[in-house]
Amino acid sequence: DENVSNLDAKIDENRLTKRPTTERNHTKTIKRRNREQQQQQREPQRTNITNIIMKKRRIAANARERRRMHSLNTAFDRLRQVVPSIGDDRKLSKFETLQMAQSYIMALNDLLDCASQQHDK
């Protein structure tokens, strides 16, 4: 009897001492779950905002690239107008335009050198 009552006392004592810890752990678990749920609710909003921002940035970058290419093509068109062409009706490619401009500049440079040499004589 005495052993049983000692055992009962120890069990009751363990329940009393462990119960607050269990309640504290349970409270911590509930708080942690609430935080996780709140974070999960915020994440889709962040994702949507991030996606919206990224889409706007991409649209802006595409617009800048279109303006840049338009400006570059306009510059090539102006260069084609001042560089002598072969004479056929087709438009020179960008590469051909640069080659013709280089050749034309060298020819003008040679012409200036010849004129300078004749002037010195």
Image (tube, rainbow, N blue to C red):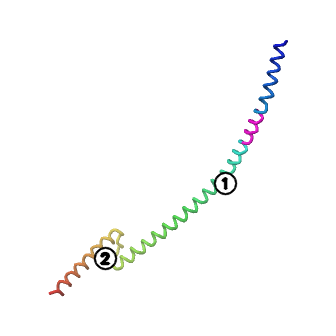
Work out whether residue 77 or residue 116 is closer to the camera in this orientation and state it.
116
Nearer the observer: mark 1 or 2; the answer is: 1
**Mark 2 Cα shell of 10 Å, populated few (<14), some (14-19), many (≥20):** some
Quadrant containing the N terminus in the rendered view: top right
Position of residue 64 measured from the top left corner of the image (x, y, whole percent):
50, 68
> Relative to residue 6, is residue 83 depicted above or below?
below
Residue type at mark 1: give it: Gln
Q: Nearer the viewer, residue 36 or 68?
A: 36
Q: Is residue 84 left or right of residue 16?
A: left
Q: Residue at the left extreme?
A: 121
Q: Amino acid at mark 2?
A: Ser
Residue 22 sits above or below residue 2 on the image: below
Q: Which residues are magenta?
A: 22-31
Q: What residue is shown with label 2?
A: 85
* Residue at left offset 82%, top offset 14%: 4
> Which type of secondary structure does the marked residue at label 2 adopt?
loop
Q: Is residue 74 magenta?
A: no
Q: Quadrant of the C terminus?
A: bottom left
**Which residue lies at the image location 51% right of the left edge and 64% below the top edge?**
62
Q: Secondary structure beneath disc 1?
A: helix
Closer to the chain start, of discs 1 and 2, is 1
Q: Main secondary structure of the magenta part?
A: helix
Query: Which of the numbered marks, if any, corresponds to residue 45?
Result: 1
Q: Is residue 53 left or right of residue 71?
A: right
In three-dimensional space, the C-alpha distance between marks 1 and 2, rounded to whole angstroms, equals: 59 Å
